[in-house]
Image: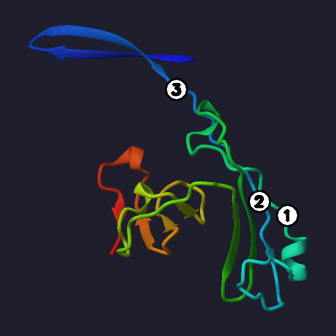
């Protein structure tokens, strides 16, 4: 791990502190989302030919990566798009799903929820989040910067 030396000058006294610089590898997984020109029926069954051809993503891991424990239950998705919509079918294996929040644009992550992050240019800035809980409560928001870069990053309402 690389180190950095910080020097502080306070009232004509110099202080020094050595800090480690984390070497976080930014290499998001890739997924090919195929186009479909056939209408899809939104019923959760995934029986259309397009859904059968679409591959599942790898199983989800914690947002902080493999430094956290692997989830006990599987979550994965398939995705397709057409000229009007992005379709995301999620398979979530969780025996104890619960939700309490019912007001739109509430901080849904306090309940069990499913979250989609859309960052067209992949720079982690100016990206959208769509979150939904088991009561079908939705929170959609725009993040101008990642939470790690600013205190008040979310734009919602």
Nearer to us of marks 3 and 2 is 2
Q: Mark number for residue 55? A: 1
Contact, mark 1 vs mark 2 (Cβ under 8 Å): yes
Q: Is residue 25 left or right of residue 104?
A: right
Residue 108, position as x, y percentages in the image: 42, 63
Mark-to-mark CA distance, 3 and 1: 34 Å
Task: State the residue position of label 3.
Answer: 22
What SS does tag 2 mark?
loop
Q: Return the residue nearer the eye: 4 or 55.
A: 55
Nearer to us of marks 3 and 1 is 1
In percent of the image, x 71 and y 85: which residue is there?
A: 42
In percent of the image, x 65 and y 34: which residue is there?
A: 66
* Of the image marks 3 and 1, the number of the one nearer the N terminus: 3
Establish if 66 lies above or below 96: above
Label 3, residues with CA under 10 Å away: few <14, some 14-19, many ≥20: few
Residue 43, position as x, y percentages in the image: 72, 83
What's the image's color scheme? rainbow
* Of the image marks 3 and 2, the number of the one nearer the N terminus: 3
What SS does tag 1 mark?
loop
Q: Is residue 133 left or right of residue 79?
A: left
What SS does tag 3 mark?
loop
Residue 71 found in image quarter: top right
In this view, the residue farthest toward the front is 95
* Of the image marks 1 and 2, the number of the one nearer the N terminus: 2
Task: State the residue position of label 2.
Answer: 31
In the rendered image, the quadrant that contains the N terminus is top right
Establish if 156 lies above or below 121: below
Contact, mark 3 vs mark 1 (Cβ under 8 Å): no
């Amino acid at each position: 791990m690389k180190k950095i030396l910080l020097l502080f000058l306070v009232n004509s006294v110099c202080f020094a502190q050595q800090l480690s610089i984390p070497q976080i590898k930014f290499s998001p997984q890739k997924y090919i989302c195929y186009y479909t020109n056939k209408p899809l029926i939104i019923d959760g069954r995934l029986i259309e030919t397009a859904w059968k051809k679409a591959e599942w993503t790898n199983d989800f891991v914690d947002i902080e990566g493999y430094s956290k424990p692997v989830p006990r239950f599987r979550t994965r998705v398939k995705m397709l798009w057409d000229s009007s919509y992005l379709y995301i079918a999620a398979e979530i294996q969780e025996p104890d799903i619960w939700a309490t929040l019912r007001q739109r644009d509430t901080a849904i992550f306090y309940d069990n929820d499913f979250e989609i992050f859309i960052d067209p240019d992949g720079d982690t800035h100016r990206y959208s989040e769509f979150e939904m809980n088991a009561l079908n409560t939705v929170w959609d928001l725009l993040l101008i910067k990642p939470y790690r870069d600013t205190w008040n990053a979310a734009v919602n309402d």
